[in-house]
Image (spheres, rainbow, N blue to C red):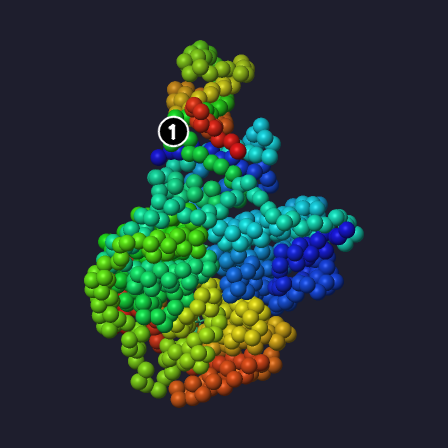
Amino acid sequence: MRRIISVLMENAPGSLSRVVGLFSQRGYNIESLTVAPTEDETLSRLTLTTIGDDHKIEQITKHLNKLIDVVKLVDLTEGAHIEREVMLIKVKAAGAQRAEIKRCVDIFRGQIVDVTASLYIIQITGTSDKLDAFLQAVGDASILEVVRSGVSGIARGEKVLSL
Amino acid sequence: MLSGGDMLIRALRDEGVTTVFGYPGGAALHIYDAIFRQQDVKHILVRHEQAATHAADAYSRSTGEVGTVLVTSGPGATNAITGIATAYMDSIPMVVLSGQVVSERIGEDAFQETDMVGISRPIVKHSFMVRDARDIPEVVKKAYYIARTGRPGPVVIDIPKDITNPFDTYPYEYPEKVKIRSYTPATRGHAGQIKKAVQLMLDAKRPVIYAGGGVVQGNGSELLTDIARKLNYPVTNTLMGLGAYPGSDRQFLGMLGMHGTYEANMAMHHADAILAVGARFDDRVTNAVNKFCPNAKIIHIDVDPASISKTVTADIPIVGAVDSVLSEMLALILESEQKPDASAVKNWWEQIDEWRDNHGIYTAPRYDNSGEKIMPQDVIKTLHEVTGGDAYITSDVGQHQMFAAQYYLFDKPRRWINSGGLGTMGFGLPAAMGVQMAHRDAVVACVTGEGSIQMCIEELSALKQYHLPVKIICLNNQALGMVRQWQDMQYDSRYSESLYEDSLPDFIKLMDAYGHVGIRVTKKEELKAKMEECFAMKDRVVFMDIAVDTSEHVYPMQIAGASMRDMWLSKTERT
Ligand SMILES: Cc1cc2nc3c(=O)[nH]c(=O)nc-3n(C[C@H](O)[C@H](O)[C@H](O)COP(=O)(O)OP(=O)(O)OC[C@H]3O[C@@H](n4cnc5c(N)ncnc54)[C@H](O)[C@@H]3O)c2cc1C
Ligand SMILES: Cc1ncc(C[n+]2csc(CCOP(=O)(O)OP(=O)(O)O)c2C)c(N)n1
Ligand SMILES: [Mg+2]
């Protein structure tokens, strides 16, 4: 099953490489990874998505927790949560295609953020599934370049991941 | 006001470190100068950095204190890697100080630069790169704290040369305490779980206590022994746990696992309740996990939550330190009205005694020693006899290691010092050096093979320098015996690269060159007398080159892919 694990860790040199190293060392896969400082500049928040059965996920969270730099973590997929990913796509958009793509962007509530005579740059935000669906709708033939931010997430309701 | 180099050594002193094993070089020279100008911390000059790590590791294993290593950058640091990995796999607390090129050269492929923090990352509990000399006291304090607490392990401190510059001085104060907000190792176990565990143990009809290295590390041997005796339950130890329960006790079944005893493996397989304590269900113990102990409910006590249910799922997991959890268990057992089921336990012991009588290695020799040849098992038995069972025994890796584990019955913890998790050949001799440094008056023997001893044999020179009279018991079977055993069993005796074709050195002459004593034993009748002669030379390093049977195998041996009860008992006999 796909999981979103959110990690609060020391914003210190080497901490990111310890997390990434753990995954390759123990043969766990990382689907996506995002990391940035938080409002408390001594802390970074790292969000990663991974796939595994319950046993594997349990081992992953235990081993992450063992890293000295990791302060706290939560498996967001265990409860209600909000998941967002940002995607920028450069597509061919000429002639009749232009209107077609524009419609598609509207349906997915995306934005066209740059335009030339023959292409658009589109920004879409949402769950990874939604982003996948948009790519499918636009079709490989017109896609020139795709860049995705990786997943960020936060628990719904009162639950807070902080010190 | 102190320089970074002086601060570092002062911090070691203030941490209580008395002994550092190391080897100098450019990036560490400021630190070495600081060592020269003080008396509190003694430095032992090894002959290879790998040996420094093994010596510090064994120093720790035999005392419970954190071992300390000092090496230079580049090749000094990389030479230390095998020893760091060895300590990591066996959860041994150690701090490795490595010199690094000056801060502003880092990343430029400078002379003798390697990314030590990067290279060591998968084999350390944590690592630090010092970026400001003023941080040294705190970093040192944290490093020792992390190494020693929770599940112990090695910690690296990488120190760029400019940080230890003698011309930049700073005020020094050693912190009394450290707090690391992201690190809170478990201590006490969950009271409810402990209660459940005691209940399960008291209800058991066929209980086994399976104790590992964590009991030795966590100083839980006495409590474990009290509990086992109180309940009259059988105990088996892992290779790392030998000595956690007295080896010569009636309730001891011997080691379990791949080369464990018949009775220990049978008891595990047929148990209905297993108390696993400070053991990690290693693949050398469980054999095929899906066939492991089919009828047992499992209690697992471990300080590291990641050890629990990693390979075998625990029915009652308890995260906590062995001493704390076992003392709570003992208290509950003592105050409980319920006593163990005496008739079930009696039946269980009868079954176990039958296993012992049929195939146990302690009830009768299960190898043929009627011939002329010296059998390796008999060498270990003689060693036990001559040393009164009270020596510190270090070991290398191979058949000799297994024979030592099986036949030197360790009655005390911290007496059996070997590399289990990584299985590092070359560990034995430097380990003996570390143990003898910690226990100057104790009898320390290294059980080795003619293969292993040639890795790290250079330390004979360090033994000379520091007057460390270790005894080397070499079971010379003219082969990489453990490899050859596997080749016999799985590759139709095709001895690919496990023989030396008459190229072995004359160890007696070699000893002479180093200024030590060599004794060769080729005849069975003279073994004991020569060994007595060896141990009578209390202040000399003595190497016993013992010609043992060259074709002997280690048995029992579990049959791969099967359950714990499936074993080869000899070359021709299996369960
Ligand atoms: C040639 C060869 C053959 C081998 N054959 C065998 C064999 O037949 N049988 C065998 O048993 N091994 C064998 N081994 C060794 C094997 O590879 C493992 O090293 C060993 O089984 C692990 O022992 P352990 O389970 O006691 O764990 P250790 O590696 O000693 O780990 C200790 C465990 O205790 C925990 N712990 C540490 N401190 C505490 C504390 N204070 N409180 C609570 N928990 C704590 C740790 O978290 C860890 O999980 C062999 C090795 C070699 C090289
Ligand atoms: C550094 C290292 N290299 C290779 C091995 C694989 N290995 C395990 S046992 C063994 C043979 C050891 O030979 P020896 O020291 O003579 O011991 P014996 O088995 O003959 O008693 C080898 C090569 C190892 N454990 N460590
Ligand atoms: Mg050999």
x, y percent for residue B519? 50, 84
In the depicted structure, whether residue A2 falls above or below residue B286: above
x, y percent for residue B239? 40, 64
- Residue at the extreme right of the image, as rendered: B167
x, y percent for residue B94? 55, 57
x, y percent for residue A15? 55, 41
Q: Residue at x 36, y 84 (%)?
A: B373
Front residue (pair B64, B426): B64
Look at the image and tell me whether residue A144 can be seen: no
Q: In the image, B477: left or right of B516?
A: left
Q: Residue at x 56, y 63 (%)?
A: B56
- The kind of secondary structure element at disc 1 is loop
Q: Residue under label 1, please give it.
A: A79
Front residue (pair B564, B16): B16
Q: Residue at x 54, y 69 (%)?
A: B435
Quadrant the C terminus of chain B occupies = bottom left
Q: In the image, B251: left or right of A157?
A: left
Front residue (pair B86, B6): B6
